[in-house]
Image (tube, rainbow, N blue to C red):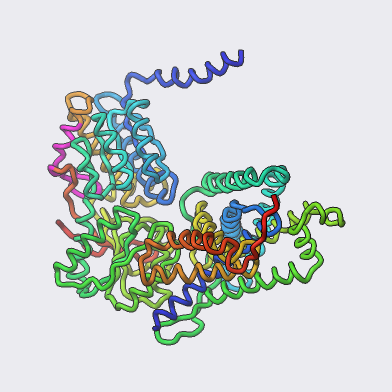
Amino acid sequence: MQDFIQHIINGISLGSIYALIALGYTMVYGILKMINFAHSDVYMVGAFAAYYVARFFGIDASPGIATLITLLVVSMVCCSLLGLAIERLAYRPLRNAPKLNVLITAIGVSLFLEYAGQVVFGADPKVFPEVMKDMVLFNIGDVELKSFDVTVLIVSVLAMLGLQFLIFKTKLGRAMRAVSANASVASLLGVNPDRIIAFTFIVGSSLAGVGSVLVGMKYPKIDPLMGMMIGLKAFVAAVLGGIGNVGGAVLGALIMGLSEEMVVAYLSSTYRDALAFGILIVILIFKPAGLLGKYTVEKV
Amino acid sequence: MKRLLLALVLVLPLLSGCTKKENEIVIGEYDSLTGSDATFGLSSNKGVRLALDEINAAGGVKGKKISLVTLDDQGKNEEAAAATTRLITQNKVVAIIGGVASGRSKAAAPIAQTHKVPFVSPASTNPDVTKVGDYVFRVCFIDPFQGYVMAKFATENLKMKKAAILRDVKNDYSVGLADVFAAEFKKRGGEIVADLSYQAGDIDFKAQLTQIRSKNPEGIYVPGYYTEVGLIAQQARQLGIKVPLMGGDGWDSDKLSEIGKEAINGNYYSNHYTTESSDPAVTEFIKKFKAKYNETPDALAALAYDAAKILVAAMERAPDLSGKAIRDELAKTKDFGGVTGKITLNENRDAVKSAVIIQVDGSNRKYITTITP
């Protein structure tokens, strides 16, 4: 029983990291109806940005909340800029091209970042600086709740609530929803779709930045290919919850984290990655729109 | 005109490739200079270069200087095979010093065997590597020996009765060590209470460690690479597991302590050599290595250094530089005084020598004991 509770804690903690990255996939899809495969590599660049800034300014010498916030800001700013640049240089020129072209471009950008990352940062793993001291908040028997796990969970829940507020309670959010519904009609009504799309990339990418610092804090080994697997899983989580749906992304991510943990605990770690894709296939067969997604008829 | 230029551009590199210097012997090396275990390859390359520089400074082999061609395998099996083909067919090397990982050697060695080019691996410890054929050698001991050494150390020195295993299922090396450790540990009256797995590239090991924790082992054997072992050690300590972790030479990198921080301290691994040795061969090697690269050589550098020295010694003894002549002399290597111990190649072309047990202590590596075959 103790083990089971520990597995649940581990799973939720893993799932909340997937959630932060899944939010980025879901947002871009919601607005542009495209899958930004480069999202997980923006996340990777965020981790390295935080790493180099921390090393250069010696921020890691004093772990604590202030360090965490500084690195979060650094990583969010770098990721936003990169996200903006990718949108401007790679996706905007293809705005009116067929969907498939944009998808291929996204994969191209992803591969470019991964391999350029190996050239620029070096392919060997780097050690993320110590951002905070991990503390035991409370324990019952062998079950321990750690401050890292709680921090990750709190930050991802805050990010999700912030997003919900942004999308449903602000003028900008209304414009985003308008562009999502129909970009050309929205532009007739005085919304600048290019601006809104750029903004979506800023928000989505900065969430990836948050994710990268939290992952770096929890698993202090970063390398240029670190985004690959976590990106795929976050993407599956977004599809599982209903891509385009913010709450769905978080729900999907938690399900992914928990089920992965349980599979490793009670079956075998070899099935860990197979599970993600198994879930994806099952969902696509039985509920193509995802758990919380709305089924819409595609206009031809 | 454009076509002419294009033709020239295509032909030029071929022409320049033909202007090989007559008084030079070319040795090939492929290594993981980039990729997830790049520190292994970089160390190994430094060891080879140091050895060849020394040999060249002393006049080379048979009055000729040796030049080294190093190709990067990026830590991938298929790249290792491609690099080996290129070394043999384009660079016309007389012998190849192979890479560090067994998987890559298994992909590359058959190519060397087919072309009858002697192949010496510095650090591929999987038993199957030298079974490829009679042109394939290695200067390190093999996996079963490392698993055996750790099981012996755990039962005799640490008095362990119950151990758990956490192996990297994707990695031949890790699986090999784990299997032999399990068999030997049981043979010595111990019990394996859990045998779980992970995959290279994973970052979360809490599920496996939580399970291991519930079985209360007295030690955990984690024969993986430093990249994951550092994280495993941290997460084990986070879950309150206090028993020692044990591993093999895959732990041997400075990154291990960087990633694992305090959590990795006090744990044991088996290795090829120790920098704490007072053997003059070792101290001399460390001094020269530090002077050239300004860093302390790890075991990979020492093994690669020995591999290059053994290969060149065989070339010097050989009547000519044909593949067969070098191979025959390599096979006769006996009691070669290397940095990693006295090296004798047995009938399977594997080195027979002792292993050391090292305890991690910050960036220091504390020598604990030597275990002989």
* Quadrant occupied by the C terminus of chain B: bottom left
Which image quarter: residue B327?
Answer: top left
The x, y position of residue B270, in whole percent, is 26, 59
Kindly identify the residue that appears in the image at 22 percent across and 65 percent down: B182
The x, y position of residue A268, in whole percent, is 35, 66
Q: Is residue B300 visible?
A: yes
Q: Is residue B248 magenta?
A: no
The x, y position of residue A167, in whole percent, is 74, 67
Kindly identify the residue that appears in the image at 65 percent across and 47 percent down: A99
Left or right of residue B222, residue A289 in this image: right
Left or right of residue A99, residue B130 in this image: left
Q: Front-most of A132 and B222?
A: B222
Q: Is residue B335 visible?
A: no
Kindly identify the residue that appears in the image at 70 percent across and 53 percent down: A299
Which image quarter: residue B195?
Answer: bottom left
Left or right of residue B213, residue A37 in this image: right
Residue extent of the magenta highlight: B327-347
